[in-house]
Image (tube, rainbow, N blue to C red):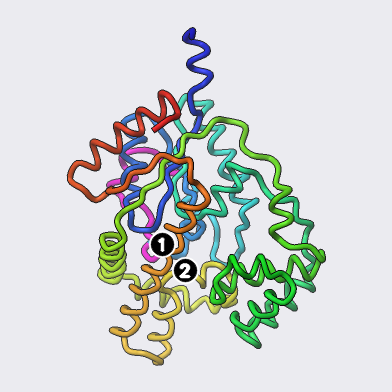
Amino acid sequence: MGEGAAEAGRPTILVIGGPTASGKSALAAEAAARFGGVVVNADSMQLYRDLPILTSWPDETLRARAPHRLYGVVDGAERCSAGRWRALAVAEIEQARAAGALPILVGGTGLYLRALLQGLAPVPQIPEAVREAVQALCAEEGSAALHARLAARDAEAARRLEPGDSQRVMRAYEVIEATGRSLLAWQRDAHGAYPGRAATLVLEPPRPALYAACDARFDGMMAAGALDEAARLRTRSLDPSLPVMKAVGVRPLHDHLAGAIPLERATALGRQATRNYAKRQTTWFRTQMPGSARLPDPYSPESKRESLALVERLLLTGAG
């Protein structure tokens, strides 16, 4: 095979996914520094500028290693859809490639990565009246009750959603309410996958070690000023249904600030929510990105050397 053909077969973007607290940000920064890359955020919460601590933006040391894009670019009063993120990400990818840099997409939001790698479902725009009615129904009856309503109309979608995941339950319900068709059916008609070749790497720590890392992460957030950050967000009096208000840890800290629970309880709930989120992410990456290269022990002393060697193989051949 000639050099030109080999170059044509190489990946044009690198995707690093995995659960929260698995070490994605550190690996992305190291890979960007080693291979001349630009880190592009693919975490739905890190887009919002209100919560750099609670959404665990890469710290100053990591950001100094390489350029980082799409962190804190959306105000908390807005809703950033997968489609909007995809447009922002594609623009950053093309800008990086034009400058001769490797775009490195990093994050744990499976919906965003799927939107980029597989395309977006052509769901018609949901009328605002329908969206507001579904939000009101969820606020009045609760997410579990809305999930039960969804199950009666779209059993397949309901089976794939946790009853407490109000954001996605509302989305699935509003789609079938407005279109008479399941969101899953629309997703099967997805189109517009990114045309470049992607090398994908998933960090998959052992469950006990991951949960310990989740607890340590939330404790570190608290030590870094997460409570003050939550208090500043609370003063904005934002709509509770906004994505930024659903960030892990926000609700228990706001409950504490309202005098409903002690700080110790709020911290324990924050740790638990982080572990629950990591579990859902782990399941998603295992089932939705099965063909990706895997790094099964990113916390080991040898992980930095091994992970960078794996990245190099992926960039050269596309295979782990």
Q: Is residue 57 above or below residue 94?
A: below
Residue occupying image coordinates x 40% and y 56% = 19
Q: Around disc 1, counting alpha carbons within 10 Å, would you say few (fewer than 14), some (14 to 19), or many (20 or more)?
A: many
Q: Where in the figure is residue 65, as x and y percent of width and height?
A: 31, 39
Residue type indicated by callout 2: Ala
User: CB atoms at circles 2 and 1 under 8 Å apart?
Assistant: yes
**Nearest the eye: 104 or 184:** 184
**Nearest the eye: 121 or 188:** 188
Question: Horizontal placement of 240 versus 222: left or right?
Answer: right
Q: Where in the figure is residue 133, as x and y percent of width and height?
A: 75, 78
Question: Horizontal placement of 19 versus 170: left or right?
Answer: left
Residue highlighted by disc 2: 247
Residue highlighted by disc 1: 55
Residue type indicated by callout 1: Thr
* Magenta-drawn stretch contains 237: no
The answer for how far apart the CA atoms under marks 2 and 1 are is 7 Å
Give the SS element for disc 2: loop
Question: Horizontal placement of 158 versus 8: left or right?
Answer: right
In the rendered image, which quarter is residue 142 located in? bottom right
Residue occupying image coordinates x 46% and y 63% = 280
Q: Earlier in the sequence, mark 2 or mark 1?
A: 1
Q: Which segment is the magenta one?
A: 53-69
- State the residue lying farthest toward the bottom: 260
Q: Where in the figure is residue 200, as x and y percent of width and height?
A: 46, 39
Q: Where in the figure is residue 63, as x and y percent of width and height?
A: 34, 45
In the rendered image, which quarter is residue 88 located in? top right
